[in-house]
């Protein structure tokens, strides 16, 4: 699903197709690319993006990542320490240190299916970052000579995807929303 309500010329699945009466001015915070899935925060408060992603205080985002082949302990350590990725405009960027751990196949609550043949080597990682460059995790995985097959955002700070079904909405009161995101309003 694209992280927008209108403007798609190709009839892709978009937020406007969700069966929910969104208030006028609702917009996505921390967009997901069309190959990613998981938690997406929607709000009408225009200050939230600035407070969450453009402030001096770093905020955590956690992802489940299925990689295409086995991944070594050295690869994981390189990801943790920071790897060099290419940004738009051919600018090299070294990612900030982050949390990375190898995990077992995630719970069924995420409707996880193995997109690879059962005998094809693959691994799952749990990655927590405090920065979010365009397609950063995918580029980080490429930097350690692997390929990202699935990318699922499971949380932003203390707002968690949990068992929320695909295409459904969970509402929060404003005070609780800001508390879970660890931002002052």
Image (cartoon, rainbow, N blue to C red):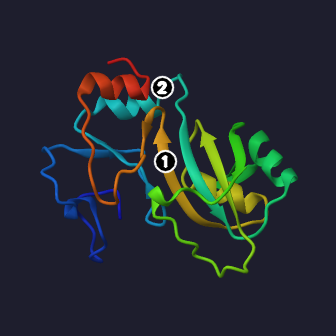
Q: Is residue 41 left or right of residue 60?
A: left
Q: Which mark is residue 154?
A: 1
Instruction: Give me the residue at 41% from left, 29% from top.
Output: 181
The answer to which quarter of the image holds residue 158 is top left
Q: Which mark is residue 163?
A: none
Q: Is residue 122 left or right of residue 34?
A: right
Q: Is residue 94 visible?
A: no
Find numbered disc 2 in the image and state the secondary structure of the residue it sits on. Answer: loop
Q: Residues within 10 Å of mark 2 (few under 14, many from 20)?
A: few
Find numbered disc 1 in the image and state the secondary structure of the residue it sits on. Answer: strand
Q: Nearer the viewer, residue 159 or 86?
A: 159
Q: Position of residue 28 (x, y in %)?
A: 32, 47
Q: CA distance from mark 2 to mark 1?
A: 22 Å
Q: Nearer the viewer, residue 65 or 142?
A: 65
Residue at label 2?
Answer: 55
Q: Position of residue 155 (x, y in %)?
A: 48, 42
Instruction: Give me the residue at 55% from left, 59% from top.
Output: 151
- Quadrant location, the N terminus: bottom left
Q: Is residue 156 visible?
A: yes
Instruction: Give me the residue at 56% from left, 49% from top.
Output: 63
């Amino acid at each position: 699903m694209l992280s927008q309500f209108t403007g798609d010329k190709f009839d892709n699945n978009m937020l406007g197709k969700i069966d929910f009466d969104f208030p006028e001015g609702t917009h996505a915070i921390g967009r997901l690319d069309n190959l990613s899935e998981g938690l997406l925060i929607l709000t009408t408060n225009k200050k939230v993006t600035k407070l969450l992603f453009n402030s001096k205080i770093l905020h955590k985002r956690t992802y489940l990542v299925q990689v295409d082949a086995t991944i070594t302990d050295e690869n994981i350590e390189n990801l943790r320490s920071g790897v060099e990725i290419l940004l738009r405009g051919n600018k090299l960027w070294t990612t900030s240190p982050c949390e990375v751990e190898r995990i077992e196949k995630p719970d069924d609550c995420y409707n996880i299916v193995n997109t690879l043949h059962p005998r094809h080597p693959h691994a799952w990682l749990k990655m927590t970052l405090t920065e979010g460059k365009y397609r950063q995790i995918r580029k980080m995985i490429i930097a350690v000579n692997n390929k990202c097959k699935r990318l699922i955002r499971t949380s932003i700070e203390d707002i968690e995807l949990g068992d929320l079904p695909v295409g459904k909405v969970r509402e929060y009161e404003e005070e609780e929303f800001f508390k879970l995101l660890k931002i002052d309003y």
